[in-house]
Image (tube, helix red, strand yellow):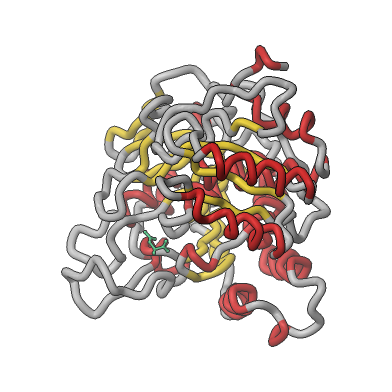
Amino acid sequence: MLFTSVLAGLALAGAASARVEDLPRHLRLAYRDLVNTTSTNGNNASLPKIVYFGTGGTIAGSSGSATAVTGYQAGALGVQTLIDAVPEIINITNIIGIQFANVASDQMNTTLTMQLSRNISEYLAADDVVGAVVSHGTDTLEETAIMLDLTIKSDKPVVIVGAMRPATAISADGPYNLLQAVSLATYPGAAGRGTMITLNDRIGSAFYTTKTNPRSLDTFKAYEQGYLGNFVGATPRFWYEPAKVLNKPYFDVTNFTTLPHVAILYAYEDMALDVPLVSAAIASGVKGLVIAGSGDGGTDSTWNRQFQSLCANASVAMVVSTRTGDGSDAPDGDSSPTISANSLNPEKAKIMLQLSLAKNGYNITAIKKDFDSDYPTLG
Ligand code: ASP
């Protein structure tokens, strides 16, 4: 029954194609892995029940060498193997494991992550399920995390976890990270905090936490907003009462299988030479563009003038973020044609813009309101 509901969900994601062979590669992979999957239940029905969706990544990665931390195959091991590697998990939870996909995170996309969101919501609606865990490749983990944060209404904890060393490495970080994620999803004090990212003993908000280093285990950080808490062993310890991002919008993705196409453009010296990139993006059919601006959303003024007029003529929404890796852009006034990403980095702003465009269409005032969530004074 559990298995069937996920299968039905994925079939929905690829509803436009009649046959599995016609699906894009990432959906075929997800479908194939799902077909080969069995759902797993922990032993003790008296323990809190959680649902665990495996999607692949380094946490499920395998290499022929115990010292290799590059060049391994991400998404090689299934959820059952990952759970079996940490027997302590079934001492604290009655776990339902579901192989949603088994891919490196570059194969995840918004069609899949909206489907994941719907599947999680479906499970969290059950009275006896107390929380959800997702394991994911770390490269795009924060994008899936903000998608879940913006589209799941439940107050039950949703925890997304990854690892920086493949499961076959000496001192692999995945098993402990997974145990902590499961522990967090069953922890009563974790409710009402939105989707959380956890790796390396830290608990962060999905809205703000970002990958800051391609190698280090301590890579997920939110410098400006900080962590929500940490772990002592496998026990979560929060710094604050349950809190959510101020005025965070909610997007209902029940009926979406795809989102409007949004691309990201990066700011740099000499970018005035590259106005054709804007034209090419518009010609490719984007409905929105996010600028990873220098400093406070800065771009070359010649480029910016042409950018604004090309986008306005094509009704393409313009969001301005920062390439600095932290902080927020000054909010744009109501009359500005551009939309400030506020505290969202470019990749998170892209997800927000896609969801906002799907909800509002090309309505700049409404899109600004979604982005102004942590600047409520602009209303
Ligand atoms: N390339 C891997 C992925 O994102 C990296 C990781 O999981 O850490 O799937």
Q: Residue at x 48, y 55 (%)?
A: 140
Q: Residue 236 placed where, x, y %?
A: 38, 32
Quadrant where the image shows the C terminus: top right
Q: Residue at x 43, y 59 (%)?
A: 137
Q: Quadrant of residue 356?
A: top right
Q: Residue at x 39, y 29 (%)?
A: 227
Q: Is residue 146 visible?
A: no
Q: Is residue 79 left or right of residue 146?
A: left
Q: How many marks?
A: 0
Q: Is residue 126 left or right of residue 323?
A: right
Q: Quadrant of residue 220?
A: top left
Q: Residue 193 placed where, x, y %?
A: 55, 29
Which residue is more in the foreground, 99 or 288? 288
Q: Residue 343 placed where, x, y %?
A: 52, 30
Q: Is residue 176 left or right of residue 20?
A: left
Q: Quadrant of ligand 1?
A: bottom left
Residue furthest toward the top? 377
Which residue is more in the foreground, 290 or 344? 290
Q: Is residue 308 visible?
A: yes
Quadrant where the image shows the N terminus: bottom right
Q: Residue 321 placed where, x, y %?
A: 53, 37
Q: Residue at x 60, y 79 (%)?
A: 25
